[in-house]
Image (cartoon, grey):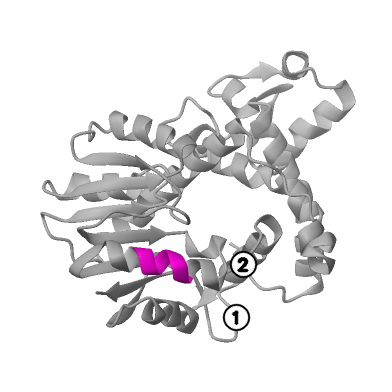
């Protein structure tokens, strides 16, 4: 768990934390945990298979043992319980895609000084197809639990018509549709994302109730007649003016009495907590042109300026809130 730095030891451990991150990221990129899933393999065979140098490779494997991600006995290595569950592709609980997405931002973070001095000069890394797919699948993995929590926080009707704006993998609409048999949804996102979303929707056998719409919600119209628009993890990618423009289109797309549900990291009014929300805001500064995290009052102001009147906030988890605005 990320926590504020309180001692010199905390300072040292946190400052050197990049070593652990890079070791884990590299092991995932090498498919090491997939190789060792429920297998005990000798060190020399692993090094040969992955084409690693003997000395460096041995220290690499032993570092993963020390971290609790591998186990070692008689010069043979295998996955630990947590690696078998979350880092081996054979597992039904595989979560490596979101970690691959984190790794894709490594070079941008390495240029933090450039961002601070002259943001526009930063050479941001383009999303390659495999990185983008990892990102979308990672959003699916993270979204399942959050979507299930939303079910207890939002009043749904059986005949809800949802626009899942920038819906990525469509997992929120999928979880909602599984719960309410009359609910229908449109996943609105870019063509490369919609292709992945279509695969996931098909896997859940919900093609008849969940549709996909290719488009750019910044430049395109959103349609009309929706009873609810979900704006999950969207506003942190954009500046105030762009978010205002998007939310005005959201307002227009809703039927009378409909509502928008914004789910995002929400800062306190001093913009210094929760820690994860502050750090994610910095992540947006590093990786986008105008993105950041917002305070509750800033989100409320955006909603009011976009036409919404009754506004309420509900806590989704320790870092995330729902902001609900009614038309």
Q: Which residues are magenta?
A: 244-249
User: Which class describes the residues within 10 Å of circle 1: few (<14), some (14-19), or many (20+)?
Assistant: some
SS under mark 1: loop
Q: In the figure, 109 relative to 87: above or below?
A: below
**Tag shown at residue 105:** none
Asked if the residue at tag 1 contacts the one at tag 2, i.e. Cβ–Cβ closer than 8 Å, the answer is: yes
User: Which class describes the residues within 10 Å of circle 2: few (<14), some (14-19), or many (20+)?
Assistant: many
Determine which quarter of the picture holds residue 326. bottom left
Residue 247 forms part of the magenta stretch: yes
User: Does residue 94 show up?
Assistant: no
Task: Give the image location of residue 141, x and y in percent.
Answer: 44, 44
**Tag shown at residue 281:** 2
Residue 290 forms part of the magenta stretch: no
Residue at point 47%, 25% (across, down):
90
The residue carrying mark 1 is 271
Q: Quadrant of the C terminus?
A: bottom left
Q: In the figure, 136 relative to 12: above or below?
A: above
SS under mark 2: helix
């Amino acid at each position: 768990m990320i926590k504020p730095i309180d001692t010199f030891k905390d300072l040292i451990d946190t400052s050197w934390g990049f070593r652990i991150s890079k070791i884990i990221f590299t092991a995932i990129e090498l498919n090491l945990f997939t190789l060792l899933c429920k297998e005990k393999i000798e060190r020399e065979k692993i090094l040969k298979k992955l084409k690693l140098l003997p000395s460096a490779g041995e220290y690499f494997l032993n570092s993963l043992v020390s971290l609790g991600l591998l186990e070692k006995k008689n010069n043979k290595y295998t996955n630990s319980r947590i690696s078998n569950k979350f880092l081996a592709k054979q597992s039904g609980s595989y979560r490596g895609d979101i970690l691959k997405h984190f790794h894709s931002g490594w070079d941008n973070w390495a240029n933090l000084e450039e961002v601070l001095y002259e943001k526009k000069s930063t050479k941001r890394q383009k999303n390659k197809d495999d990185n983008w797919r990892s990102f979308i699948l990672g959003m699916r993995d993270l979204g399942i639990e959050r979507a299930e929590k939303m079910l207890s926080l939002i009043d749904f009707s059986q005949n809800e018509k949802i626009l899942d704006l920038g819906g990525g993998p469509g997992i929120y609409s999928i979880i909602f549709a599984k719960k309410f048999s009359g609910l229908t949804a449109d996943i609105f996102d870019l063509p490369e994302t919609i292709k992945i979303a279509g695969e996931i929707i098909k896997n859940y056998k919900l093609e008849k109730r969940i549709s996909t719409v290719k488009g750019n919600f910044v430049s395109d119209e959103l349609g009309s007649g929706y009873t609810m628009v979900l704006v999950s993890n969207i506003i942190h990618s954009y500046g105030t003016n762009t978010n205002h423009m998007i939310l005005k289109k959201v307002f227009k797309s809703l039927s009378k009495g409909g509502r928008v549900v914004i789910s995002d990291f929400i800062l306190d009014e001093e913009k210094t907590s929760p820690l994860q929300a502050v750090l994610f805001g910095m992540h947006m500064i590093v990786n986008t042109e105008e993105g950041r995290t917002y305070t509750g009052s800033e989100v409320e102001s955006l909603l009011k300026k976009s036409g919404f009147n009754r506004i309420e906030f509900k806590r989704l988890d320790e870092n995330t809130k729902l902001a609900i605005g009614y038309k």
